[in-house]
Amino acid sequence: MSSSSSSSASTVPYSPEVWDGVVIKDLEDNDVEMSTLWKDRKVVVIFVRRFGCALCHQQAHTLMELRPKLSALGYHFIAIGNGSKTFAKKFQTGLPFEGEIYIDSTSESFKKASLPRLSMWQITKRFLLNVKLFGVFYDLNKKFKASDAVGDGQQTGGVFVFGPGSKSEILYSFRENDNEPDVFVNPDEIWKACGGSGDWRSAPSVESPDAPTSSSSVDFASPVVEASSAASSGSSSSAESSPVKSSSIEPKAQEVL
């Protein structure tokens, strides 16, 4: 497993205005217009491809390591997924995810962000025929006990940092489908894009961010860098180097579907 290490040459082709008018739901079934979430706030938004996905848990875990540091800079964390409230709450408590969680049952917000839905053949090539992922999934499923194989695995996700306002600049953009499956957001890049100086690990923290404006946060804790493309096929992770018994591979590979 790895994080993006350098910026790609591509540019972000849109602004947060693409989400203007899109309505999603909070975990109390209230309609929420997306633009209100960042009208007066700086935000880190993670589009979760599947609430039970172990890869998504790793992505969110990386962001949660940054959360106290970015909260000190005034950032709020938001997760949007197309699964059910049950899956979302499991994601929230199992990870845990210390931020606001919303449901987009139509995946309209994903489409607006150019986060594609993959065909079954694309899923097969990207995950099930990717032998090096077997060890990765084996490790991630042990690490994140709340991960499971339930939900829509064809949707892809991403991470965006921007705000306040729909006309603000997107400071950081990461699309999963533009990278290898085991490449995640780079916290160093996000930190610098958000205006952080020095090493984020030694920066001041805020454990409890300002109360979010959305009612979805009732029971929860509450400037363009394009993420780098995937590492070359020659790169490897510690998960890949460890042998995995064949009896463990098939069930873990199915986790992505």
Image (tube, grey):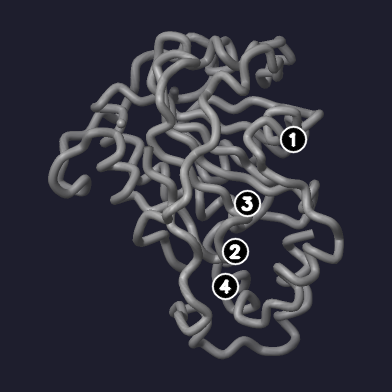
Q: Residue at x 77, y 53 (%)?
A: 153
Q: Earlier in the sequence, mark 4 or mark 2?
A: 4
Tell me which amino acid carries mark 1: Asn
Query: Is residue 213 at all visible to an observer of this figure?
Result: yes
Task: Calculate the distance from the C-alpha at mark 3 to the C-alpha at mark 1.
Answer: 17 Å
Callout 3: SS: loop
Tell me which amino acid carries mark 4: Val
Q: Residue 213 location, x and y as percent?
A: 48, 9
Task: Calculate the distance from the C-alpha at mark 2 to the C-alpha at mark 3.
Answer: 19 Å
Q: Residue at x 43, y 51 (%)?
A: 227
Q: Earlier in the sequence, mark 2 or mark 3?
A: 3
Task: Calculate the distance from the C-alpha at mark 1 to the C-alpha at mark 4.
Answer: 24 Å
Q: Residue at x 71, y 80 (%)?
A: 248
For label 3, the residue is 146
Foreground label between 4 and 2: 2
Q: Earlier in the sequence, mark 4 or mark 3?
A: 4
Tell me which amino acid carries mark 3: Ala
Q: Earlier in the sequence, mark 3 or mark 1?
A: 1
Disc on res. 136: 4
Disc on res. 256: none
For label 1, the residue is 82
Disc on res. 181: 2
Task: Calculate the distance from the C-alpha at mark 4 to the C-alpha at mark 2.
Answer: 10 Å
Query: Is residue 50 at all visible to an observer of this figure?
Result: no
Asked whether the residues under the numbered discs 4 and 2 touch, taking CB atoms below 8 Å apart as contact, a structural biologist would say yes
Foreground label between 1 and 2: 2
Who is closer to the viewer here, 166 or 141? Answer: 166
